[in-house]
Amino acid sequence: MKFAATIAAALAALILNAAPSLAQGKGKIDRLYVLNCGEGVAGDISRWSPGVNEGKSMDFVDNCYLIRHGNVWMIWDTGISDDVAAMPDGLKPADPRMTLWKRPKTLAGQLQQLGVKPDDVKFIAVSHTHPDHVGNVEMFSKAMLLVQKSEYEWPGANNAPRFKPEHPVTKLEGDHDVFGDGSVTIIATPGHTPGHQSLLVKLAKTGAVLLTGDAVHFKDNWDNRRVPANNFDKDKTVTSMERIAQILKKEHAQLWINHDKAQRDTLKLAPQYYE
């Protein structure tokens, strides 16, 4: 009996250690700002929901998030390049089924309104390396970039690097507790790209919020667990969505979907903030 109990305990410990877990600290961030980092129209949303919504267009938005933790600032995603603000007709895609993006407000201008300088930002993390998420990374040239190693090393067009080699970087291999107190946790959610990641933030009044990145693009896709045709890995996408669902349940968290305009229209935008 004693031997059997020992074996059972060992197996339980093995299973527990094998399962991904989140930081259990009780820290909370002070403020979370939602920034307008682009608005556009997707020409054919069946690209994101194969076999459904053929030929249907949809308004998209692109959010960035500014986080204050004590005296430390962090940026999550940087949106479409601020240069697009100077394009009256927006940034037109080569494929009309994709998204035509416009920049009604610049990221630089919104930060200035909040009294935050780019050099004040200590950490910058991006969900992945598509242009509508990394468009202003080099505005924060001194900030530590937090990105999955598999995303950082994923070759870009013509095998070009995804980021400037001189940019300070921490290459992650899985989840990462940014401040060491459980208040901000990067969640590895591969599938859309090799090293896609999402972000779990905890606030004293608002509670926990999970920022999707592009693990999911709009609510209908989330509800039906649809996988975009051009995702890097379908199976990993499905696994990541299931993991997100588990985290939402465990943390009693809200799901904020980055490109979903209907949801974004219900949120407070900077200079208002969540706490």
Image: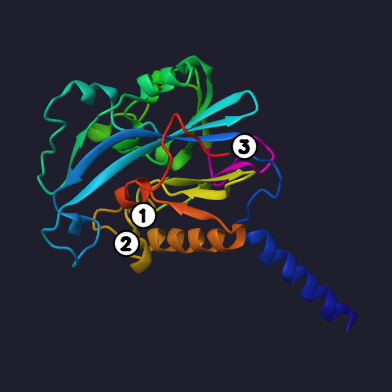
Tally of numbered discs? 3
The three-letter amino acid code for the residue at tag 2 is Asn
Would residue 26 be found to the left or right of residue 66 on screen?
A: right
Tell me the quadrant of the picture where the N terminus can be found.
bottom right
Residue 184 painted magenta: yes
Would residue 271 be found to the left or right of residue 130 on screen?
A: right
Q: Which mark is residue 221?
A: 2
In percent of width and height, residue 190 lies at 42, 51
Give SS at disc 2. helix
Would residue 247 be found to the left or right of residue 227 on screen?
A: right
Residue that numbered label 1 is attached to: 216
Q: Residue at x 28, y 35 (%)?
A: 38
Q: Which residues are magenta?
A: 172-186
Give SS at disc 1. loop
The three-letter amino acid code for the residue at tag 1 is Val
Image marks 2 and 1: residues in contact by CB distance under 8 Å: yes
Tell me the quadrant of the picture where the C terminus can be found.
top right
Q: Which mark is residue 29?
A: 3
The three-letter amino acid code for the residue at tag 3 is Ile
Residue 183 painted magenta: yes
